[in-house]
Image (tube, rainbow, N blue to C red):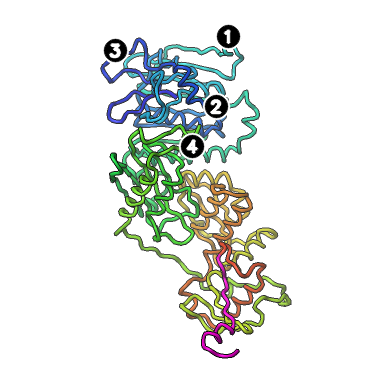
């Protein structure tokens, strides 16, 4: 990569030159070849692994160039064409030419230390690696004269020169200040790499999610993302709330709060700037906790856990928050060299930094309007249609049990022979609904309900990309959707296997599960989805006080017909038992 990120100094970027700093280093140029010792220290193999990686490297360069606007356009899955344009500091001709060479960078001195570098990138590898795997065209200008066009074509035949180098074409070009990089025919000479990629929609979904990460981490920069000529994301570059609105939707942005705080940690301070959705806005998976360090989106389990820790018990069980948190640290406390993709970073005093993040999040949520409301399904008859044989011949596990009451408006008390059973009514209802949906999904089509008129659902950019990528799987689950402009989808049908239609939250859960953001097999993801769908219509605390003994009997019958009646789909127990001997011993009686 090339360029230097230097907030407040107007640092030149992609292929950093000396303009704006008042020195006279232009003749020699700012892009330099690294010495062999530094090359050996930072070398980590090929940088380019998939189209999203190309986008990330080019966005890094644009941000290092102090760009206020970054425009990304992608054709197909990204192997056809990727275009990234910025309005940052451009390059001189000498620097632009050298920027596509291996081990040439403006971000390190020839013998520099990559740890503590104050930029998003430091390897000096990205443009050269991209150029080796594709046709790369770079057009750049410092805005003070004629610009430069450089073409390095990795798809062309080698020239036979030393190190198998290919010709690089350099010529004058007109452009306003900034840099545009166009990458075409990615992996054209590497068919195995192309074949290892997912489908076009899935690859673009990766790109969309990554750009959304950058937009939330850098809210003062205006980002735009086009796919096959259609705009899919546009942020205004104003503030954090507007960025959240562009990436998610108006409902999420309106139910959020922002915070910008500094916490002393040892001899330095930790800055935490965040947009936090209220706990009434949740998702089924953890990938909506977006963490960045010094403006770079990263994966750091400790920091993400700290964000969730800050929410504490405000979150409903099994739900995850929506949050974008940027942590500012001195460069010497961050090591971006722990992972080739630079998506993971090492932090000095990581536990102390995490504690600072958790405290800031907790304080920001204190006193906010965190009220939650939810619809509750109470149609017990339609929700608990029998799943056994029509003649009822299938024996149930609770055939001889007799419901005798309800405790704390949730626990069904049941007399069963010599035992007193306490049944978690919600968990039991979840198990029934889960097995009915699982049977329907494995065999017959999932029962659906048609929405007339269709409902509109606002999705984040990566959710919208996932909806396109998994349209067939969603339809198999009963969600028939169509694009309705921007990040909005029209929901025509929804699953209705319980006598109650699913809602927008269930649709988002389906997207999360089918996107494979968690671990495990595709079947594991499907089972997680079914468990979440089963939860939505299940009876909850507050629904049992008015249940008749006949209603409770229905619940026992349906639970008894389940294959695994003694655990809910999330693994919690449904039934606890106390035998008569326990009571006798407690009261000092003989049995």
Do the residues under discs 1 and 3 have CB atoms within 8 angstroms? no
* 590 within the magenta span: yes
Q: Does dot 3 land on a helix, a strand or a loop? A: loop
- Can you identify the residue that label 2 sits on? 45
Is 422 rendered above or below residue 462? Answer: below
Question: Distance from label 1 to label 3 (Cα)?
Answer: 34 Å
- Label 1 packing within 10 angstroms: few (<14), some (14-19), many (20+): few
- Can you identify the residue that label 1 sits on? 161
Question: Distance from label 2 to label 4 (Cα)?
Answer: 35 Å
Q: Is residue 63 visible?
A: no
Q: Earlier in the sequence, mark 2 or mark 3?
A: 3
Numbered mark located on residue 24 in the image? 3
Residue at figure coordinates x 60%, y 9% from the top left: 160
Do the residues under discs 1 and 2 have CB atoms within 8 angstroms? no
Quick one: quadrant of the N terminus? Answer: top left
Question: Distance from label 4 to label 3 (Cα)?
Answer: 44 Å
- Horizontal side of 50 relative to 397 (left or right) equals left
Q: Is residue 333 visible?
A: yes
Q: Nearer the viewer, mark 2 or mark 4?
A: 2
Is 25 rendered above or below residue 71? Answer: above
Residue at figure coordinates x 42%, y 51% from the top left: 322
Q: Nearer the viewer, mark 4 or mark 3?
A: 3
- Can you identify the residue that label 4 sits on? 230
- Label 2 packing within 10 angstroms: few (<14), some (14-19), many (20+): few
Q: Position of residue 574 (x, y in %)?
A: 57, 70
Q: Does dot 1 land on a helix, a strand or a loop? A: loop
Residue at figure coordinates x 39%, y 46% from the top left: 351
- Label 3 packing within 10 angstroms: few (<14), some (14-19), many (20+): few
Q: Position of residue 387 (x, y in %)?
A: 67, 70
- Horizontal side of 342 relative to 366 (left or right) equals right
Q: Which residues are magenta?
A: 572-591
Furthest residue in direction left, as rendered: 22
């Amino acid at each position: 990569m090339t360029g230097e990120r230097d907030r407040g100094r107007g640092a030149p970027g992609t292929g950093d030159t000396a303009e704006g700093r008042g020195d006279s280093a232009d003749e020699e140029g700012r892009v330099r070849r690294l010495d062999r010792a530094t090359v050996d220290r930072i070398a980590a193999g090929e940088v380019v692994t998939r189209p999203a990686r190309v986008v990330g490297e080019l966005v890094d360069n644009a941000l290092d160039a102090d760009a206020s606007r970054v425009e990304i356009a992608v054709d197909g899955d990204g192997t056809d064409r990727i275009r990234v344009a910025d309005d940052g500091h451009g390059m001189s001709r000498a620097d632009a030419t050298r920027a596509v060479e291996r081990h040439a960078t403006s971000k390190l001195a020839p013998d520099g230390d990559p740890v503590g570098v104050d930029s998003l990138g430091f390897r000096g590898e990205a443009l050269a690696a991209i150029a080796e795997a594709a046709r790369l065209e770079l057009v750049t200008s410092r805005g003070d004269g004629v610009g430069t066009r450089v073409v390095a074509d990795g798809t062309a035949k080698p020239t036979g020169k030393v190190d198998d180098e290919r010709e690089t074409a350099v010529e004058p070009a007109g452009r306003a200040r900034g840099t545009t990089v166009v990458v075409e025919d990615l992996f054209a000479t590497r068919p195995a790499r192309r074949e290892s990629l997912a489908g076009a929609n899935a690859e673009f979904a990766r790109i969309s999610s990554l750009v959304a990460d950058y937009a939330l981490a850098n809210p003062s920069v205006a980002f735009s993302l086009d796919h096959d000529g259609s705009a899919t994301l546009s942020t205004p570059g104003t503030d954090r709330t507007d960025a959240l609105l562009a990436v998610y939707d108006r409902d999420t942005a309106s139910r959020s709060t922002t915070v910008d705080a500094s916490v002393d940690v040892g001899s330095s301070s930790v800055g935490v700037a965040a947009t936090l959705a209220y706990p009434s806005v949740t998702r089924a998976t953890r990938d909506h906790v977006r963490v960045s360090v010094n403006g770079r989106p990263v994966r750091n389990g400790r920091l993400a856990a700290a964000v969730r820790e800050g929410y504490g018990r405000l979150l409903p069980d099994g739900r995850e928050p929506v949050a974008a948190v940027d942590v500012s640290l001195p460069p010497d406390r961050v090591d971006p060299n722990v992972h080739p993709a630079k998506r993971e970073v090492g932090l000095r005093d990581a536990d102390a930094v995490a504690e600072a993040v958790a405290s800031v999040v907790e304080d920001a949520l204190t006193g906010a309007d965190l009220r939650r409301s939810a619809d509750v399904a109470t149609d017990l008859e339609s929700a608990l249609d029998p799943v056994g044989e029509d003649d009822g011949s299938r024996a149930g596990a609770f055939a001889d049990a007799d419901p005798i009451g309800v405790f704390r408006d949730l626990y069904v008390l049941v007399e069963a022979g010599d035992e007193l059973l306490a049944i978690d009514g919600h968990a039991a209802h979840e198990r029934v609904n889960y097995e009915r949906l699982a049977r329907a999904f494995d065999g017959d089509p999932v029962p659906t309900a048609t929405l007339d008129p269709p409902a509109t659902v606002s999705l984040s950019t990566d959710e919208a990309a996932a909806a396109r990528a998994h349209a067939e799987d969603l339809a198999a689950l009963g969600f028939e959707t169509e694009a309705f402009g921007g990040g909005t989808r029209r929901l025509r049908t929804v699953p209705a296997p319980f006598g109650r239609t699913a809602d927008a939250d269930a649709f988002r859960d389906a997207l999360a599960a089918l996107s494979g953001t968690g671990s495990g097999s595709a079947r594991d993801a499907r089972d997680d989805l079914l468990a979440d769908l089963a939860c939505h219509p299940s009876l909850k605390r507050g629904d049992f006080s008015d249940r008749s003994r006949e209603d409770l009997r229905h619940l026992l019958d349906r639970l008894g017909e389940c294959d695994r009646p003694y655990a809910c789909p999330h693994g919690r127990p449904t039934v606890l038992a106390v035998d008569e001997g326990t009571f006798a011993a407690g009261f000092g009686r003989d049995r």
